[in-house]
């Protein structure tokens, strides 16, 4: 009987772990291979008084369990008002998402350029090798952007090629020999050096790749920029807004916005889905799992507790056939800019300990299915036939059905009433009261 019951209990996740509490193992924040804390997991590539660019450490360097994300990197860009990230290209595809502030994104082609006004919730694919630059045209508000990078030359590594020669880096044109430059530009090298590289004495160089703009420069750049379309999410080459349509899940406790590869050609090319989720303080995103997508969750605003359920890695020694697999709980307290990876098929739950917004990149997203383990709608457990439920759970089918129907909400629920019932006054989040009581 255990051979039938245990795998199904693993599938059902944290809600039904009471039956296997003997085998439960817990991994807290610091030993959690899926948790990348902002304070020690980002490396600064560039920073000056105008902004900064940071890389998240390579996923497979954090843990061998993240090996399937070795080809992906998370990049964070922030800039002050009235600044520009200078023109450059990279040997990586990017999926850019605006978290806060306004931006003007310009993509340069061989014979043309396209400029777009971007707002929070806007996303845009930047193909590898595309020269682009980013302006923060706002007078007072900082710009914050997150990018998912997919390198094309080296797994997990890519290079930025800047046209400008600044105090922070050389122009990539300077890599060519003098005679090649003279022939290419039909000019003497001294003129090329003075005009393009600024290396003559007393020639002023920019302090870095993020520089200030004048009001007039911003005005001219703004005139050429088009507004991103909020009417369609299916654009092949223009920005689209993740939050322009109604959320796929919504109630008084949260909203879940998502665009899948089936809805957008840019996401289809990358096989990625994008989600933006709002959860009210004290509310819970109910336990669920993704059928095939690996999710990279990035906290934009607020704090949260997260629990993830997996199977403990087996030791090298041969296990006895009758010895059960061990369930492992991975938990973390998440804050702004923290990153958490959710493997495919691993059940997880998110509790907002303050008003929360997070962004999620779903890798390997085509035909992914989200399976909830509690709640009235989209609940995979409720679809199991009564005769099978009697084999899965020690309770009768009637008791199981009655239990599963108690939760009248779907997707998001208020955890506060349960906290009060368990006597958890003053605690933030449901885990000590709801989940702790199971063990």
Image (cartoon, helix red, strand yellow):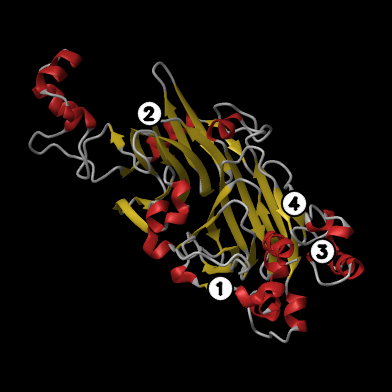
How would you rate the neighbour count of disc 1 (Cα within 10 Å): few for under 14, some for 14-19, many for 20 or more?
some
Residue drawn where x is 29% and y is 52% of the image: 48
Residue beneath label 4, please?
249
Q: Nearer the viewer, mark 2 or mark 1?
A: 1
**What distance separates the C-alpha of mark 3 from that of mark 2?**
56 Å
In the displayed structure image, the side of residue 247 where residue 215 appears, left or right: left
Q: Check if mark 4's residue and mark 2's residue have beta carbons within 8 Å.
A: no
Q: Where is residue 289 drawn, in percent x and y? A: 66, 55
**What distance separates the C-alpha of mark 2 from that of mark 1?**
46 Å
Q: Where is residue 51 drawn, in percent x and y? A: 36, 51
How would you rate the neighbour count of disc 2 (Cα within 10 Å): few for under 14, some for 14-19, many for 20 or more?
some
Q: Which mark is residue 129?
A: 2
Residue drawn where x is 55% and y is 39% of the image: 123
In the displayed structure image, the side of residue 291 where residue 313 appears, left or right: left
Q: Check if mark 4's residue and mark 3's residue have beta carbons within 8 Å.
A: no
**What distance separates the C-alpha of mark 3 from that of mark 1?**
25 Å
Residue beneath label 1, please?
25
Quadrant housing residue 384: bottom right
Whether 285 is drawn above or below 195: the answer is below
Please name whichever residue, 147 or 225, is drawn nearer the observer in this view of the structure.
Answer: 147
Residue beneath label 3, please?
391
Please name whichever residue, 202 or 164, is drawn nearer the observer in this view of the structure.
Answer: 164
Instruction: Name the quarter where the N terminus is drawn.
Output: bottom right
Closer to the N terminus: mark 3 or mark 1?
Answer: 1
Closer to the N terminus: mark 2 or mark 1?
Answer: 1
SS of the residue under disc 2: loop
């Amino acid at each position: 009987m255990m051979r039938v019951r245990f795998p199904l209990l693993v599938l059902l996740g944290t809600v039904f772990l009471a039956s296997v509490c003997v085998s439960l193992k817990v991994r807290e924040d610091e030993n959690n291979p899926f948790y990348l804390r902002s304070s020690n997991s980002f490396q600064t590539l560039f920073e000056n008084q105008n902004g900064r660019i940071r890389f998240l450490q390579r996923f497979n360097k954090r843990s061998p369990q993240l090996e399937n994300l070795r080809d992906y990197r998370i990049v964070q860009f922030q800039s002050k008002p009235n600044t520009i990230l200078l023109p450059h290209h990279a040997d990586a595809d990017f999926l850019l998402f605006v978290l806060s502030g306004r931006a003007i994104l310009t993509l340069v082609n061989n014979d043309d350029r396209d400029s777009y006004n971007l707002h929070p919730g806007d996303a845009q694919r930047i193909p590898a090798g595309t020269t682009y630059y980013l302006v923060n045209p706002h007078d007072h508000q900082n710009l914050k952007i997150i990018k998912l990078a997919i390198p094309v030359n080296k797994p997990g590594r890519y290079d930025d090629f800047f046209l400008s020669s600044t105090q922070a880096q050389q122009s990539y044109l300077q890599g060519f020999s003098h005679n090649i430059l003279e022939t290419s530009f039909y000019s003497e090298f001294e003129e090329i050096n003075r005009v393009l590289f600024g290396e003559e004495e007393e020639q002023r160089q920019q302090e870095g790749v993020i520089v200030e703009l004048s009001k007039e420069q911003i005005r001219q750049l703004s005139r050429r920029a088009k507004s991103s379309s909020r009417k369609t999410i299916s654009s092949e080459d223009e920005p689209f807004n993740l939050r322009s349509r109604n959320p796929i899940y919504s109630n008084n406790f949260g909203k879940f916005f998502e665009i899948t590869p089936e809805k957008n050609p840019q996401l289809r090319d990358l096989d990625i889905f994008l989600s933006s989720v709002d959860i009210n303080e004290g509310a819970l995103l109910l336990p669920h799992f993704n059928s095939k997508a690996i999710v990279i969750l990035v906290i934009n605003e607020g704090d949260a507790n997260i629990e993830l359920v997996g199977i403990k890695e087996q030791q090298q020694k041969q296990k006895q056939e009758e010895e059960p697999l061990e369930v492992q709980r991975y938990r973390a307290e998440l804050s702004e800019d923290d990153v958490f990876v959710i493997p495919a098929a691993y059940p997880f739950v998110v509790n907002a300990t303050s008003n929360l917004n997070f962004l999620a990149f779903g890798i390997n997203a085509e035909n992914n299915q989200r399976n909830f383990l509690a709640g009235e709608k989209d609940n995979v457990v409720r679809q199991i036939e009564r005769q099978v439920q009697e084999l899965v759970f020690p309770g009768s089918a009637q008791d199981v059905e009655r239990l599963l129907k108690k939760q009248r909400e779907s997707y998001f629920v208020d955890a506060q009433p349960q906290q009060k019932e368990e006597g958890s006054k003053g605690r933030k989040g449901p885990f000590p009261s709801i989940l702790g009581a199971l063990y």
